Image: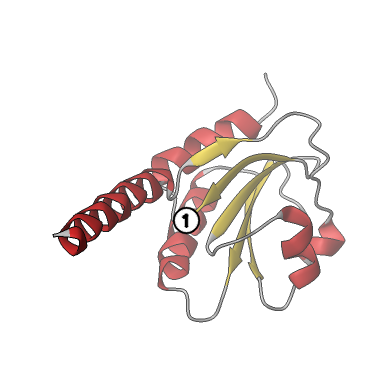
Amino acid sequence: MTGLVVCAAVLALATAFGIVHRRGNGRVRVRAKDSGERLTAAELGGPLGERATLVQFSTAFCAPCRATRRVLSDVAGMVDGVRHVEIDAEAHLDLVRRLGVVKTPTVLVLDAGGEVVRRAAGQPRKADVIAAIAAALPAA
């Protein structure tokens, strides 16, 4: 009887963890202003976007990374002055550690100056990426 109770408790905890984990996957989060997280063109291996930059941390065998690449490329093509940069997380471990990237894909939305204004761990939805870019653009 005790084994059955333990099994039911473990199953309930695993289900709760799965639900919480799934709800947070891909959600775009706001970064605190003046968090100090800033990327330069040298760290990205190319110029920043004129208005915003989408930085994607990926690994070679990451299936969601391919879908994220398509979403970010589409959005960058739709919005003038936005650039998409993909960074191999395994080849840039110093940057991964400094920015606290713990899973791939991780997407950072940078403003024109390179400051991280939004962040998503997991595969973000296209609508969320567009909204994050709108928040990164300077007020007109």
Name which quarter of the figure residue 84 lies in.
bottom right
Q: Pinpoint residue 113: horizontal percent, then vertical percent.
A: 81, 40
Asked if residue 69 is positioned above or below residue 82 in the image, the reply reads below
Q: Residues within 10 Å of mark 1 (few under 14, many from 20)?
A: many
> Residue 68, position in %: x, y?
46, 60
Quadrant for the C terminus, please.
Answer: top right
Q: In front: 10, or 99?
A: 10
x, y percent for residue 42: 86, 63
Which kind of residue does numbered mark 1 sit on?
Answer: Gly
| Extreme residue in the top direction | 140
Residue 68 in sight: yes
Q: Residue at x 75, y 72 (%)?
A: 92
Helix, strand or loop at mark 1 = loop
- Seen at 44% across and 49% down, the residue is 26
Q: How is the image coloured?
A: secondary structure
- Residue pointed to by mark 1: 122
